[in-house]
Image (cartoon, rainbow, N blue to C red):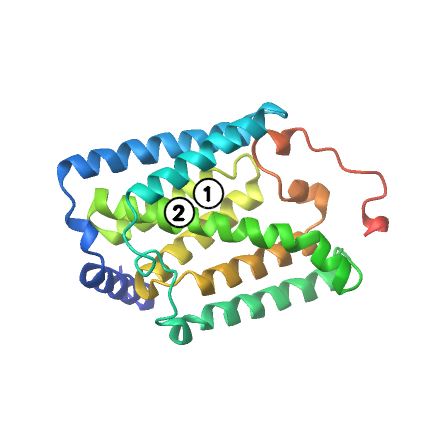
């Protein structure tokens, strides 16, 4: 592997090796990491593939498990990316996301597939929940999966690929989101390894996700649904005229 991507991988690996002291965990800790990953991911998949109203109860079980295991293995707020350090050096990611989103919206406008809410109030009402969900997803990807995978694989680049893979698989059977989330997941993991800051990732994920939602017709992307809800999605008549 050569070129800028290989350079970024080496920089990310080098930076992680000097800042993440958890990579030298004991065998018992690594077994615990593996069990927590397996149980946590299984619970997430069960939530995604369970119909309502049972889904709600399993959701609380999964959320409780992740909160408790994160609290038990809590490294520090800084190690988890909740810090101001390197924010100014890493905010460029949100700028890149904004450029991509602008191009995407422009193309959708030209193709007449744009269906953004009219007015700022309607926009906030529709997408504030998605922004919160995007932040939760980013926390799960970086702090629940990636940090444990680094301790298991010892090679941060390998951990990033695996984390992106499990992130993408959770978006099946939605083909658009599965491909998009693998690309974003890998980018986000490599970015996190280098800068160890979640805030630009929160912003970029929200920007890109909302741009995709308003640019691609709901019947095509099934309103950004995954799992069982993707299979049970039914487009409303007159979808394009009502947005």
Q: How many marks?
A: 2
The quadrant holding residue 148 is top left
Specify the quadrant of the image occupied by residue 10: bottom left
Name the secondary structure under disc 1. Answer: helix
Residue 208 screen position, x and y as percent: 57, 59
Q: Against 64, is 136 above or below? A: below
Judging depth in this view, the residue of 45 and 7 nearest the camera is 45
Tell me residue 141's x, y (percent): 41, 48
Q: Above or below — where is 175 with respect to 57?
A: below
Residue 154: % across, % down: 19, 48
Residue drawn at 24 percent across, 34 percent down:
32
Q: Which residue is mark 1?
A: 168
Task: State the SS at label 2.
Answer: helix
Residue in the image at 38% along x and 75% along y: 89
Q: Residue at x 46, y 37 (%)?
A: 63
- Is residue 136 toward the left or the right of residue 144 in the image? right
Dot 1, how many residues are within 10 Å of its Cα: few (below 14), some (14-19), or many (20+)?
Answer: many
Q: Cβ–Cβ below 8 Å for labels 1 and 2?
A: yes
The residue singled out by tag 2 in the image is: 164
Which quadrant holds the N terminus?
bottom left
Residue under the image location 25 percent in, 66 percent down: 11
Mark 1 and mark 2: Cα distance apart in space: 6 Å
Asked which quadrant contains residue 189, the reply is bottom left
């Amino acid at each position: 592997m050569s070129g800028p991507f290989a350079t970024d991988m080496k920089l990310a690996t080098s930076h992680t090796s000097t800042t993440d002291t958890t990579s030298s965990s004991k065998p018992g800790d690594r077994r615990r990491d593996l069990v927590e990953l397996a149980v946590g991911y299984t619970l997430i998949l069960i939530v995604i593939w369970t119909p309502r109203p049972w889904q709600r109860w399993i959701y609380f079980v999964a959320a409780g498990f992740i909160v408790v295991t994160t609290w038990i293995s809590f490294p520090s707020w800084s190690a988890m990316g909740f810090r101001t350090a390197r924010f100014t050096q890493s905010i460029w990611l949100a700028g890149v996301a904004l450029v991509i989103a602008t191009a995407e919206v422009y193309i959708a406008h030209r193709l007449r597939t744009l269906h953004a809410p009219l007015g700022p109030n309607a926009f906030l009402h529709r997408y504030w929940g998605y922004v919160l969900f995007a932040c939760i997803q980013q926390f799960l990807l970086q702090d629940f999966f990636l940090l444990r995978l680094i301790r298991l694989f010892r090679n941060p680049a390998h951990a990033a690929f695996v984390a992106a893979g499990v992130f993408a698989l959770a978006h099946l059977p939605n083909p658009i989101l599965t491909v998009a989330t693998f690309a974003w997941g890998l980018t986000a993991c490599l970015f996190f390894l280098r800068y160890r800051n979640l805030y630009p990732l929160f912003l970029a994920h929200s920007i890109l996700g909302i741009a995709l939602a308003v640019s691609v017709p709901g019947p095509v992307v099934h309103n950004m649904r995954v799992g069982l809800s993707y299979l049970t999605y039914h487009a409303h008549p007159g979808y394009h005229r009502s947005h």
